[in-house]
């Protein structure tokens, strides 16, 4: 007993216990749990997310715990997380840390506060590592502003925050976290932290149904479970809003990836250009030295060609701005709803009109009003997505991964969504790189995502069978055939993912 009593307790025992509890409840490793928890504490302490205080009634924390307010970062929910989650310094658990050690997930890490103070104090001008982080944040802030203003639906970030990440007033499907002893003063902060991880998990790591449910919550018009924003079997959402949101999320990811990759290429170009200029100066200096020594240039030096200039085209986000999603997948969802055993519309009044529904027609067998016939239930949406558009959930999952873990590879257990890329080639079927038809195809199978290679098109290759044959010879991979009707303009086609 004496030996047990005298054994010193680990200074990070509480932190380890907290990580173990969260790890048992959510599909993340300790490194990811630490990253998100530390960032959440910092953003709350800086009052970056006032939605909790003003709309959800969660009291401010005390002594730097989650919810305390001081300095406002002035950005949106999505922009703040994209900007800070992957750029904060890692935690310091070295033995020589005595004052200001990080030993509680509910408290702000002093190292983060010191790091941010150094950046604001201009330390980044003399610290190359800080300068890189500052440049990275500026780039993320720039592209996220474009995404939120021109791609995602208005106020999507705040709606998503409130309906998916907000603390609940009653137990959710996973129950209230109670695996460790929680001090009454920390209980609200702990529930807030656990619920936040629940939102990330449901949106990106717990399978397609959870992700689609999170997407559905952002579109439903009314009858959410009071106080927690949960969708239930009596909740309905406009079919067009659901498909349109998934389409916009896929474009948001494509724009984010395209811009950040392009910025990396431009950085490499700067390095290449500097090296090229240095090599040029060295050659000129060598020639001058040879001239002073009386050595004449001969033809041998002609094979020493000058390095080619590296050309990087500037990425244009506007080329991927969303178009009208159209009625293809929307009508498919509504038709599925009208033929199922479940009602296609709620029996209660909507809290607001459905968006962009004027072009949709109601089923002749449905007695509901035109407005109500455009609504679908959660269960209908889930079952339809699984059978018709199984990659629809990946739109949200991939986007959330870019927000919270952009520097980490996509989990191999999940299917990443890649918006189809025509690589600058003209197409009579897809007049825009952001064509909704491209999204429709990619939502059906992962094989149709990413870069496409055009084998044959009649508007450029002609209608000769010989040209068609020559275009197809030697290729036997996945193939999409699309045919457009001359008179009516209807489009139909076929797809095979096997060799032929």
Image (tube, rainbow, N blue to C red):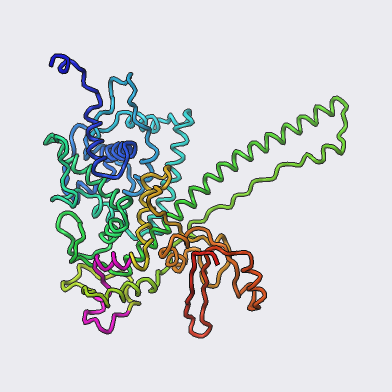
Res. 155 in view: no
Above or below, comparing residue 110 to residue 358 in the picture: above
Q: In this view, does 12 lie to the left or right of 433?
A: left
Residue at x-position 51% and y-position 78%: 484
Q: Where is residue 242 in the image (x, y as percent from the top left)?
A: 32, 65
Q: In which quarter of the image is residue 248?
A: bottom left
Among the 4 quarters of the image, the one containing residue 93: top left
Residue 427 magenta-drawn? no
Residue 252 location, quadrant: bottom left
Q: Give the range drawn in magenta.
A: 361-385
* Image location (x, y in percent) of residue 126: 48, 28
In-front residue for pair 23/371: 23
382 within the magenta span: yes
Q: In this view, does 447 lie to the left or right of 148?
A: right
Residue plotted at (44% across, 66% down): 441
Q: Name the residue nearer the viewer: 442 or 413.
A: 413
For image coordinates 57% across by 41% down, the residue present is 268
Image height of 480 relative to 404, above or below = below
- 471 lies above or below 57: below
Q: In this view, does 151 lie to the left or right of 66?
A: right
């Amino acid at each position: 007993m004496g030996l047990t009593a005298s054994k010193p307790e680990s200074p990070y025992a509480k932190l380890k216990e907290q990580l173990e509890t969260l790890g048992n409840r959510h599909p993340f490793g300790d490194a990811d749990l630490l990253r998100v928890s530390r960032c959440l504490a910092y953003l709350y302490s800086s009052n970056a997310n006032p939605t909790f205080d003003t709309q959800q009634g969660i009291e401010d924390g005390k002594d730097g715990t989650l919810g305390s307010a001081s300095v406002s970062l002035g950005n949106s929910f999505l922009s703040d997380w994209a900007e800070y989650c992957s750029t904060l310094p890692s935690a310091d658990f070295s033995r020589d840390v005595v004052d200001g050690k990080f030993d509680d997930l509910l408290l702000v890490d002093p190292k983060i506060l010191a790091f941010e103070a150094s950046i604001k104090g201009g330390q980044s001008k003399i610290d190359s590592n800080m300068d890189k982080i500052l440049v990275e944040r500026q780039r993320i802030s720039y592209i996220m502003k474009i995404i939120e203003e021109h791609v995602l639906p208005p106020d999507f970030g705040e709606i998503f925050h409130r309906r998916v990440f907000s603390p609940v007033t009653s137990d959710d499907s996973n129950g209230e976290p109670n695996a460790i002893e929680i001090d009454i003063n920390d209980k609200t902060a702990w529930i807030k932290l656990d619920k936040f991880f629940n939102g990330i998990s449901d949106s990106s790591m717990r399978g397609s149904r959870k992700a689609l449910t999170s997407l559905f919550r952002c579109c439903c018009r009314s009858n959410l479970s009071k106080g927690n924003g949960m969708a239930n079997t009596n909740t309905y959402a406009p079919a067009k809003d659901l498909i349109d949101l998934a389409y916009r999320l896929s474009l948001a990811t494509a724009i984010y990836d395209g811009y950040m990759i392009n910025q990396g290429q431009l950085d490499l170009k700067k390095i290449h250009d500097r090296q090229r200029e240095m090599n040029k100066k060295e050659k000129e200096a060598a020639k001058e030295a040879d001239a002073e020594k009386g050595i004449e240039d001969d033809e041998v030096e002609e094979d020493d060609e000058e390095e080619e200039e590296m050309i990087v085209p500037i990425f244009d986000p506007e080329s991927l701005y969303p178009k009208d999603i159209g009625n293809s997948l929307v009508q498919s969802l509504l038709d599925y709803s009208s033929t199922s055993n479940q009602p296609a519309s709620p029996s209660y009044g909507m809290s607001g009109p459905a968006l962009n529904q004027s072009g949709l027609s109601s089923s002749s067998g449905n007695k509901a009003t035109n407005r109500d016939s455009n609504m679908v239930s959660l269960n209908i949406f889930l079952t339809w997505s699984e059978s018709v558009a199984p990659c629809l959930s990946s739109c949200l999952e991939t986007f959330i991964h870019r927000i919270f873990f952009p520097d980490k590879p996509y989990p191999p257990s999940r299917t990443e969504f890649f918006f189809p890329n025509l690589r600058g080639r003209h197409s009579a079927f897809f007049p825009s790189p952001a064509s909704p038809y491209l999204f429709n195809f990619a939502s059906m199978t992962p094989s149709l995502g990413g870069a496409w290679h055009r084998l044959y098109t009649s508007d450029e290759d002609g209608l000769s069978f010989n040209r068609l044959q020559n275009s197809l010879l030697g290729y036997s991979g996945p193939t999409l055939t699309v045919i457009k009707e001359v008179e009516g303009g209807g489009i139909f086609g076929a797809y095979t993912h096997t060799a032929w």
